[in-house]
Amino acid sequence: MIKVLLADDVQILRAGLCTVLESDSDIKVVGQASDGKEAYEMSIRLKPDVVLMDMRMPDYDGGYGTRKIKDTLPDVKVLVLTTFDDKETVDKAIASGADGYILKEMDNDKIISSIKAVAGGINVFCDNIFKSIKKDVYMQQDAKNYDLTDREIDLLRLICEGADNKEIASKLYLAEGTVRNGISKLLEKLGLKDRTQLAVFAIKNNIL
């Protein structure tokens, strides 16, 4: 059973989403929050598997809630569900640590499948958002400029598979701190901002 917390300032939308999501036997909505701060506080208490987070909410927005949740509860997945796909909002969500970004215009079954994918450790981005991220990476990088080590390629491969630092450490027989440092150095080496851009870089350059 996937425990989901809804975060949106529009109550009627939360109620509708709750009905849609709980029509799937694998999903249970454990709480509803009206802003990012409440989403964070409820996540501390309820320990959901996935937080379905709107980005634009009054007082404490989705960026605030996502950042607080990922800093404190890194195992909780945050899937942004919003109506906005402008670069500023997308960049804010990704910089805050969102595990995925989809739009409210998506069909209900696609929203449900996105929740299941994120809960399973797969980063999910709707097509136009992924294309936007990929375009940014294309503009920044050319694989020929970098000499990646076998260890760095292993890190990229496991990041693309959705593995967290603990899982990477186990598979590569490394300390978790060594993995964190390795990923930080890889980000710095490639001039990228986060794990999502690392995954896009690896796919774009056929590293996998």
Image (cartoon, rainbow, N blue to C red):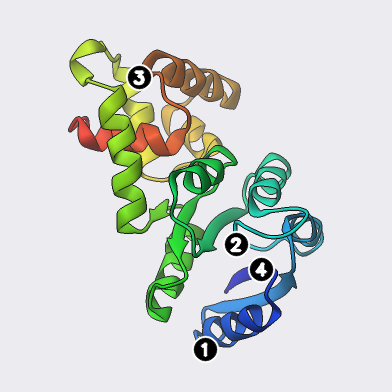
Residue that mark 4 sits on: 8
User: Which callout, 3 or 4, points to the residue nearer the camera?
Assistant: 4
Residue at 57% over, 54% down:
77
The residues bearing labels 4 and 2 have C-alpha atoms spaced at a distance of: 5 Å
Label number found at residue 151: 3
Q: Which mark is residue 23?
A: 1
Q: Is mark 3 on a helix, strand or loop?
A: helix
124, 95: nearer the viewer: 95
| Quarter of the figure with the C terminus | top left
Q: Is mark 1 on a helix, strand or loop?
A: loop
Are the residues at dot 4 and dot 2 in contact (C-beta closer than 8 Å)?
A: yes
Nearer-N-terminus badge (1/2): 1
- What's the residue type where badge 2 is placed? Asp
Image position, residue 136 (x, y; %): 33, 34
Amino acid under disc 3: Arg
Between 50 and 56, the one nearer to me in the picture:
56
Q: Is 146 left, or right, of 184 in this rendering?
A: left
- Looking at marks 2 and 3 on the same chain, the residue that comes earlier in the sequence is marked by 2
Q: What element carries label 4?
A: loop
Q: Position of residue 53 (x, y in %)?
A: 60, 61
Q: How far apart are marks 4 and 1 (CA)?
A: 19 Å
**Which callout, 4 or 2, points at the residue further toward the start of the chain?**
4
Q: Residue at x 28, y 47 (%)?
A: 131
Q: Nearer the viewer, residue 69 or 138?
A: 138
Residue placed under numbered mark 2 in the picture: 54
Please report the residue visible at 60 percent of the width from the left and 62 percent of the height from the top: 54
